[in-house]
Image (tube, helix red, strand yellow):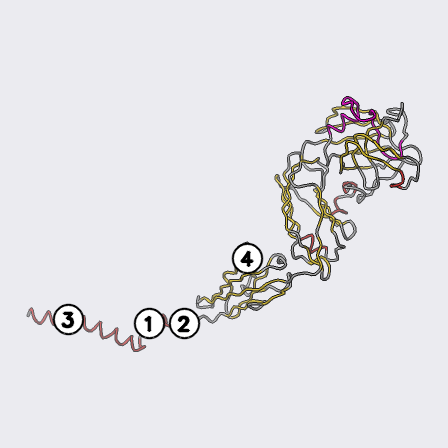
Amino acid sequence: MAVGALLLATAACGGGGSDSGSAGDGKNPGKATAVAQSGQSEAVVTIAPKNGATSVDTSGALKVTAAKGKLTEVVVKDGKGTKVDGAISADGTSWTPATHLAASTKYQVHAVAKDAAGRTAAEDASFTTLTPKNTFVGTFTPEDGSTVGVGMPFSVRFTRGITHPEDVEKAIRITTEPPVEVEGHWFGNDRLDFRPEKYWQAGTKVTVRLNLDGVEGRPGVYGKQSKTVSFTIGRNQVSVVDAKAHTMQVMQDGKVIKTIPVTTGKPGYATWNGQMVISEKFTVTRMNGDTVGYDGEYDIKDVPHAMRLTDSGTFVHGNYWGGDAFGNYNASHGCIGLRDVRGGYDGKAPAAWFFSHSIVGDVVVVKNSTDPVVSPSNGLNGWNMSWEKWKA
């Protein structure tokens, strides 16, 4: 009996082994499915441009697609390992970069897709972008690391006229802390300014990423600039000049801290009305009427404490020759004059005080002049344009 039980148990074990053997002959459906799942994926990944391609366009040429499957991963890197941002389409059949590529750069592409059975297929390729024969750059203000007034836009002037403005504007990204909406506006085809709807909040930190390398600004002309610029908004100072009352009220955070007698443009040479931003400061400078269309009317070689308000030559500056005009009547050729001494050595003079308390980016507002409002493009004076027109 014991021997019979032992044989029965052995037969039971041997019976299991016999079933396994039948599966090895392809008669077990579970095993067959496992074999099928381990086969080659039906997904087909295609990378354009082809592996090894050279002189590839920086825009529109790079695309990854999947047939008989969906993309699950696409990684594009340049030679330094920097990734190119991009997105897989909702249906998983394609990937496109979020921006243009840099010029004269080798890129590596790795893409993975899965078919309906979950099997993966991968493809790798490399290519090199074109080396442009014609290039452009943007010169900008304010400078990296600077502290500026609440009226300072970020202004870029390009060395070539731009005929693809949307592509160029897209290549400039501005972030702020605290966050605020910032929009760009083109003045002609070679200048792009960015600003918020209202003056910056004091203390705001602004970071600008100029990703112009490889962007096609006009047919056959490519940017060659990749730079990050950061600047900080200082205290809030806005000065209001009343051309009729011959005064300037200097305000910080909306409170008047000083009232200064001034003289503005005399009849026939009235000062612009409107909001003007200090764009340059000069301890001393030469002012020659020939440079602004007033031929031979004046040539003063040592104008002290001068700060530019417009490209056309409007300054707020020290004046040592104005006699009793300050606070009494308008006597200038369009500038805003403050009492000063020749050589600018007197730190207590109104012009010296205002110069020392002003920074590039501060706002000077002129009202009650007989001249029109200054053009938004004349200097950094886009504040004279409504937010709706600015965004349009």
Estimate the spatial distance between the alpha carbons at disc 3 and disc 4, rounded to whole Å.
66 Å
Q: Position of residue 134 (x, y in %)?
A: 71, 59
The answer to which of marks 2 and 3 sits earlier in the sequence is 3
First in sequence: mark 2 or mark 4? 2
Three-letter code for the amino acid on which mark 2 is drawn: Gly
Q: Which residues are magenta?
A: 332-357
Along the line of sight, the residue nearer the viewer: 299 or 159: 299
Q: Secondary structure at mark 1?
A: helix
Which residue occupies 93% across, 38% down? Answer: 296
Q: Which residue is mark 3?
A: 10
Q: Nearer the viewer, mark 2 or mark 4?
A: 4
In the rendered image, the vertical position of residue 347 relative to residue 160, given as above or below = above
Q: Amino acid at mark 3?
A: Thr
Q: Going from the N terminus, do you reach mark 3 or mark 4 first?
A: 3
Which SS class for mark 4? loop
How far apart marks 2 and 1 lie (CA) works out to: 13 Å
Marks 1 and 3, how far apart at CA = 25 Å
**Mark in front: 1 vs 4:** 4
Which SS class for mark 3?
A: helix
Q: Secondary structure at mark 2?
A: loop
Report the residue marked by disc 2.
Answer: 39
Number of the front mark, 3 or 4: 4
Distance (Cα) linking label 2 and label 4: 34 Å
Residue 140: name its quadrant: top right
Q: Is residue 273 magenta?
A: no
Q: Which residue is mark 4?
A: 79
Q: Name the residue at 71% across, 62% down.
A: 220
Image coordinates of residue 245 in percent, x first then y, are: 86, 26
Where residue 292 sits, quadrant-wise, is top right
Q: Quick check: 370 above or below 321?
A: below
Read off the residue under disc 1. 31
Q: Earlier in the sequence, mark 1 or mark 4?
A: 1
